[in-house]
Image (cartoon, grey):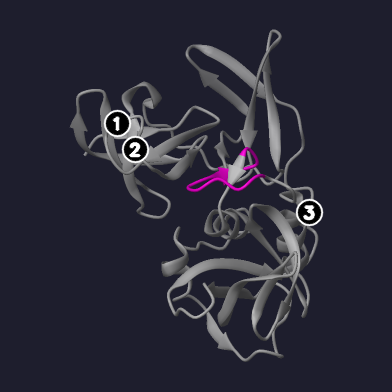
């Protein structure tokens, strides 16, 4: 099966092979995929990292590259003779930090793995906080726009823990925790008030405060009822899961 690698900062994945279709996910730079189907100027792909499927424009296709170094900063700058572009957190780059895109070689000078001496919980917290005020974007996974499950997946990805893409999948991970026993880095899942379907997820920063993507990446206090944002009961608590 033919494979490719994303060599754009990110590439939108859509629900159907047309530009106006819903964006359901996004490939980050260096993430690879299998091509499942072709339709005119669109490719149906399966992301190798988490198995997520969707459509990308064939203009986003690049030949397969086996990149293995994770970008753990919110973003890094790649430059070449005055030309620049930005590589987001969670992307994969070559070990020598030199990228070849459209025949041009870009270099990343920023140091990576600067927090790897810290305990895992602090690394997760630091990564999550770096996204504060990132705007909410359905299907997004980067500092340019991110959704709730995308935030959780990328934060854990750059710290060596693989989680599935969607909230409905993430809720199946880890061990149940009773309210009142939650700790930093536990995942908290929510429904809309009065309903039981999971629609939202965030990560605890301590035993009372949660970081999540709701309108923007923000910090709120977790209550037994769920989340109140600007005085409005927006989310009802469903479950708390320990991942680490």
Q: Is residue 44 left or right of residue 112?
A: left
Tell me where residue 64 appears, x and y as whole percent: 37, 31
> 116 or 169, which is in the foreground?
169
Instruction: Tell me where residue 209 sits by quadrant.
Output: bottom right
Q: Is residue 198 left or right of residue 221?
A: left
Q: Which residue is mark 3?
A: 115
Residue at (76, 63) in percent of width and height: 219
What is the spatial separation of the Cα atoms under label 1 and label 3, in whole angstroms? 41 Å
What is the spatial separation of the Cα atoms under label 1 and label 2, in whole angstroms? 6 Å
> 34 or 236, which is in the foreground?
236
Residue at (60, 42) in percent of width and height: 145
Q: Is residue 205 left or right of residue 13?
A: right
Q: Which residue is mark 1?
A: 18
Which span of residues is magenta-colored? 135-144
What kind of secondary structure does the magenta stretch mostly adopt? loop
Height in image: 8 above or below 115?
Answer: above
Q: Residue furthest top?
A: 81
Q: Are marks 1 and 2 in contact (CB under 8 Å)?
A: yes
Height in image: 95 above or below 230?
Answer: above
Please say whether residue 16 is visible from this viewpoint: yes
Q: Which residue is mark 2?
A: 21
Tell me if residue 152 is in the magenta stretch.
no
What is the spatial separation of the Cα atoms under label 3 and label 2, in whole angstroms? 38 Å
Q: Residues within 10 Å of mark 2 (few under 14, many from 20)?
A: few
The numbered mark, 3 or 2, whose residue comes first in the sequence reads 2
The numbered mark, 1 or 3, whose residue comes first in the sequence reads 1
């Amino acid at each position: 099966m033919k494979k490719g690698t994303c060599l754009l900062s990110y590439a939108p994945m859509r629900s159907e092979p047309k530009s106006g279709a819903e964006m359901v996910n996004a490939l980050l730079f260096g993430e690879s995929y299998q091509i499942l189907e072709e339709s005119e100027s669109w490719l149906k792909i399966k992301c190798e990292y988490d198995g997520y499927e969707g459509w990308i424009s064939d203009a986003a296709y690049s030949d397969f590259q086996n990149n293995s170094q994770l970008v753990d900063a919110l973003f890094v700058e790649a430059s070449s003779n005055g030309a620049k572009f930005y590589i987001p957190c969670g992307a994969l780059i070559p070990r020598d930090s030199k990228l070849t895109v459209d025949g041009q070689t870009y270099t990343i000078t920023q140091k990576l793995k600067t927090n790897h001496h810290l305990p895992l919980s602090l690394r997760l917290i630091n990564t999550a906080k770096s996204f504060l005020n990132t705007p909410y974007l359905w299907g997004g996974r980067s500092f340019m726009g991110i959704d709730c499950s995308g935030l959780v997946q990328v934060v854990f990805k750059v710290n060596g823990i693989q989680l599935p893409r969607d909230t409905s999948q993430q809720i199946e991970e880890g061990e149940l925790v009773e309210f009142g026993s939650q700790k930093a880095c536990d995942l908290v899942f929510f429904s809309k008030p009065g309903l039981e379907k999971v629609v939202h997820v965030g990560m605890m920063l301590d035993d009372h405060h949660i970081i999540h993507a709701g309108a923007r990446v923000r910090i709120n206090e977790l209550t037994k009822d769920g989340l109140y944002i600007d005085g409005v009961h927006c989310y009802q608590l469903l479950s708390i899961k320990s991942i680490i």
